[in-house]
């Protein structure tokens, strides 16, 4: 490409970008000036879109409960207002325009429906009204409020955290209905045999449930749910998730090392964090296989912090094929003398 | 007005318009932000460049169920690479909330997302309430192995040996031979932490920020707050602490470009949800913090919110991470660990073959619908071990007697009869007439806005409407 031609094209591209910036920024400014529309005087030359109430707060609704609202608008300008598009920010909000063409002084409506689906909590959704109003080509409407569940659960999840092997522990959860004073929990079923759940307190429809980890399972992560049957018409069945980890003297993160698909000749390093849960426990040695995988302790805590950070390196000389390796941590723990971390992945030809 | 435009002369504008009109039919390879329209070709070697994202809420990439889905870590990486080609001086910041909910799948998601942020070169990740809900063990592990600094200015760290969180970080950037110091702080709103039992205590952000600001204001040239709160709360912080130059904020903000705010000299910019957008801020450096050096109107930051859409390719490196993520789901057999509940009235799933005995005409019609091949669509994209995807591509995954694995319950693959009509054991025995009424509310469990944004019950119903069966009636009422 010769230089003068290139320069012309470059100048043109810059000009295009500047123009787009200019036009879109004018639009952006208009969006922020929604609240200034009352200043519009009757002397406006073009069409002027005007919403008396661009923001609708539906207050509080239940999960799954739909909300409908009509946004009324007026053309306060001197030319015909053409609504080019009404764009919602999510599929949960539908907006139907009654009339695309609004003569000066006339009004129109946008009928919006918000379906919260499975959402909960505070929500704000926006609707953009794109028109030929030169001052406000994109006008922002909002629909907001709070979506609540009938049955309130606190805490929402039960996190047992790290529990030592053999240790018994429990958590409590408080459950009540936000609408039904005679709320009842009819049945409680934990999903795992090592969890016991029972009502410890019930007052005016508010239940306190004790969730106990009793028959301690083997070392590793666990999760499940407490299934509740209630007399709430909106939520007859409620699940409270629980999770945690049974730990021995040593915990490793991750439990397996995944290198994924690696191009042959490439070197990759993964980090392995070894948490020491008991005093006087230490790593005696580390063994890795196959021989193109090596490991090195790069950080070692002292005194109260006996944790380790290990780098596990996959070397460039690894041959193509699956990596079926192991990292073995030898410790002075009686219950975990060897902790095995599988190493997985595949070396591909470049 | 966040974006400040240099003054255009009338003549200049006319020339540009003329050029546009003349050359409007020619293609150009320009890239510009879909939300705000800035050219990515602009470089800012004399400015501080910030990239901000957040509130991934467990969304790693669009599932591919519908066209024009935004977001995804692989596209984000490609865009960041593009931005870096034009200027290497970017500070990448994450607002918080990598996972969406608790559970093993979100733990793996959180690890994967953080690895992706690490590979992309993020400087800091602010702790959000969803991050906290994963528990101190997982957070601690991630804080140990990741190069991305975890920051929070209002979390009381219960175990600093395990959980590495800094109240702030200071990044140094060379601009025109001068070193500019950028202080980055982070908060999470205590109101978002509804579980008082959490091991991690979250204190009032306004109180916790004051001593840190006192400490940093003389030592930094620019102060940025990652404010994991509602926009209104961030505006209050901006009012209380005008020392912040930029507050990256927002919670559950769907279209970030609509919620940009300016409070005195502080800019409050939201990130949006589910990683659909990437924000950039280009700020002029302030080499000292005296009042005289406050920015003038001709020297203000430019904020861009860029939609991560089909303009951006998927980065192969991050795609590989997501492939490993899918492998891990398979490896850990998460399908077998899906939370299951009893079916209504303790009925059982029987599978399509049993339905076909009496409803053969309907069955034959169903076989040619997308519902029937729903499982195969997941096989094509290699997501067949992903419980979140499988839920809407098989029958009854979340119920006892429903789909478990393709090996153990092959008759329940695809969106079968009982996906819409409910478990059919009782109907099989009694041929009851009141079985399986369907309405739009049943459909939106899967055809929700994220995965099926174009769903309209009446239109979609036409795609699956059953032919009349001799002995039974159409179940649509």
Image (spheres, rainbow, N blue to C red):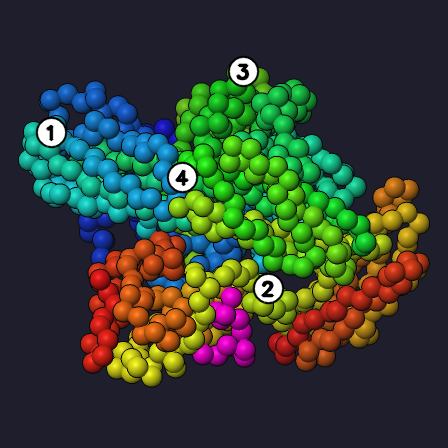
Q: Which residues are magenta?
A: B400-411
Element assignment for label 4 = strand
Nearest to viewer (mark 2 / mark 1): 2
Instruction: Single out the mark in the foreground, 1 or 4.
Output: 4
Give whichever of discs 1 and 4 has the lower sequence position. 1
Quadrant occupied by the N terminus of chain A: bottom left
Please state the chain letter of the residue tagged with numbered disc 3 in the rendered image.
B
Density class for disc 4 (Cα within 10 Å; few <14, some 14-19, many ≥20) is many
B426 relative position to B410: left or right: left
Note whether B143 is above or below B178 in the view shown. Answer: below
Q: Residue at x 36, y 38 (%)?
A: A61
Q: Is residue A348 visible?
A: yes
Q: What crowding class fits label 2: few (fewer than 14 Cα within 10 Å), some (14-19), or many (20 or more)?
A: few
Residue designated by label 1: A77
Residue B337: image tag: 2
Residue for point 22% across, 79% down: B471
Tell whether position A242 is magenta.
Answer: no
Task: State how far apart marks 1 and 4 are (Cα).
Answer: 38 Å
Front-lying residue, B103 or B221? B103
């Amino acid at each position: 490409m010769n230089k003068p031609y290139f320069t012309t094209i470059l100048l043109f591209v810059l000009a295009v970008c500047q123009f787009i910036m200019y036009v879109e920024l004018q639009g952006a400014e208009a969006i922020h000036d929604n609240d200034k529309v009352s200043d519009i005087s009757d002397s406006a030359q073009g069409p002027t879109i005007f919403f008396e109430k661009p923001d609708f707060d539906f207050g509080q609704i239940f999960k799954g409960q739909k909300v409908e609202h009509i946004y009324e608008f007026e053309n306060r300008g001197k030319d015909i207002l053409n609504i080019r598009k009404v764009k919602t920010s999510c599929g949960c909000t539908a907006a139907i325009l009654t009339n695309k063409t609004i003569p000066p002084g006339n009004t129109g409506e946008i009928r919006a429906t918000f379906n919260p689906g499975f959402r909960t909590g505070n929500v704000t959704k926006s609707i953009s009204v794109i028109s030929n109003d030169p001052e406000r080509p994109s006008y922002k409407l909002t629909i907001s409020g709070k979506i609540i569940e009938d049955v309130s659960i606190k805490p929402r999840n039960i996190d047992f955290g790290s529990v030592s092997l053999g240790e018994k522990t429990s958590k409590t959860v408080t459950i009540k209905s936000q609408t039904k004073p005679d709320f009842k929990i009819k049945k409680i079923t934990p999903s795992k045999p090592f969890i016991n759940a029972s009502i410890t307190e019930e007052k005016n429809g508010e239940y306190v449930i004790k969730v106990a980890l009793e028959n301690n399972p083997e070392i590793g992560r666990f999760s499940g749910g407490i299934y509740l049957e209630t007399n709430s018409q909106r939520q007859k069945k409620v699940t409270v998730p629980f999770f945690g980890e049974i730990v021995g003297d040593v915990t490793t993160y991750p439990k397996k090392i995944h290198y994924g698909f690696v191009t042959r000749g490439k070197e990759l390093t993964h980090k392995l964090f070894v948490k020491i849960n008991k005093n006087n426990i230490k790593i005696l040695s580390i063994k890795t296989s196959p021989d193109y995988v090596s490991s090195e302790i790069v950080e070692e805590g002292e005194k109260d912090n006996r944790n380790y950070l290990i780098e596990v390196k996959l070397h460039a000389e690894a041959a193509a094929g699956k990596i079926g390796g192991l990292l073995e941590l030898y410790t002075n723990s009686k219950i975990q003398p060897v902790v095995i971390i599988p190493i997985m992945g595949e070396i591909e030809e470049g | 007005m966040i974006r400040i435009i240099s003054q255009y002369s009338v003549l200049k504008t006319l020339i540009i318009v003329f050029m546009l009109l003349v050359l409007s039919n020619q293609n150009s390879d320009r890239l510009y932000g879909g939300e705000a329209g800035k050219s990515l070709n602009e470089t800012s070697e004399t400015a501080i460049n910030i990239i901000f994202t957040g509130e991934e809420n467990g969304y790693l990439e669009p599932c591919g169920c519908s066209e024009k889905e935004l977001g995804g870590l692989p596209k984000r990486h490609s865009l960041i690479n593009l931005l870096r080609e034009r200027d290497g001086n970017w500070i990448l910041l994450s607002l918080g909330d990598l996972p969406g909910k608790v559970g093993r799948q979100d733990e793996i998601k959180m690890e994967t997302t953080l690895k992706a942020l690490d590979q992309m070169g993020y400087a800091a990740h602010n702790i959000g309430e969803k991050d906290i809900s994963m528990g101190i063990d997982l957070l601690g592990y991630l804080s140990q192995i990741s190069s991305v600094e975890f920051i929070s200015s209002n979390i009381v760290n219960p175990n600093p040996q395990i959980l590495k969180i800094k109240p702030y970080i200071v990044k140094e950037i060379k601009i025109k031979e001068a070193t500019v110091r950028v202080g980055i702080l982070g908060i999470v709103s205590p109101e978002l932490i509804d579980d008082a039992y959490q091991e991690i205590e979250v204190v009032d952000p306004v109180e916790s920020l004051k001593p840190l600001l006192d400490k940093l204001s003389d030592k930094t040239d620019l102060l940025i707050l990652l404010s994991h709160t509602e926009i209104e709360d961030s505006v209050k912080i901006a009012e209380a602490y005008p020392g912040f130059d930029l507050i990256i904020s927002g919670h559950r903000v769907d279209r970030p470009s609509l919620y940009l705010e300016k409070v005195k000299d502080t800019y409050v910019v939201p990130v949006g949800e589910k990683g659909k957008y990437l924000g950039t801020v280009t700020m002029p450096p302030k080499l000292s913090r005296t009042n005289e050096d406050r920015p003038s109107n001709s020297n203000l930051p430019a904020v861009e919110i860029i939609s991560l859409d089909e303009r951006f390719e998927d980065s192969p490196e991050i795609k590989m991470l997501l492939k490993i993520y899918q492998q891990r789901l398979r490896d850990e057999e998460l399908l077998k660990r899906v939370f299951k509940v009893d079916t209504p009235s303790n009925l059982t799933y029987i599978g399509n073959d049993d339905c076909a005995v009496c409803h053969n005409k309907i069955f034959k019609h169903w076989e040619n619908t997308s519902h029937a091949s729903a499982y195969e669509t997941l096989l094509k994209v290699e997501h067949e071990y992903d419980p979140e995807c499988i839920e809407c591509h098989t029958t009854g995954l979340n119920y006892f007697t429903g789909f478990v694995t393709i090996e153990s319950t092959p008759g329940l693959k695809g969106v079968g009869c009982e996906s819409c009509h409910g478990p059919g054991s009782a109907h099989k025995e009694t041929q009851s007439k009141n079985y399986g009424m369907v309405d739009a509310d049943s459909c939106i469990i899967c055809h929700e806005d994220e995965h099926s944004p174009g769903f309209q019950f009446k239109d979609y119903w036409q795609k699956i409407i059953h032919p009349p069966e001799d002995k039974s009636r159409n179940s649509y009422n």
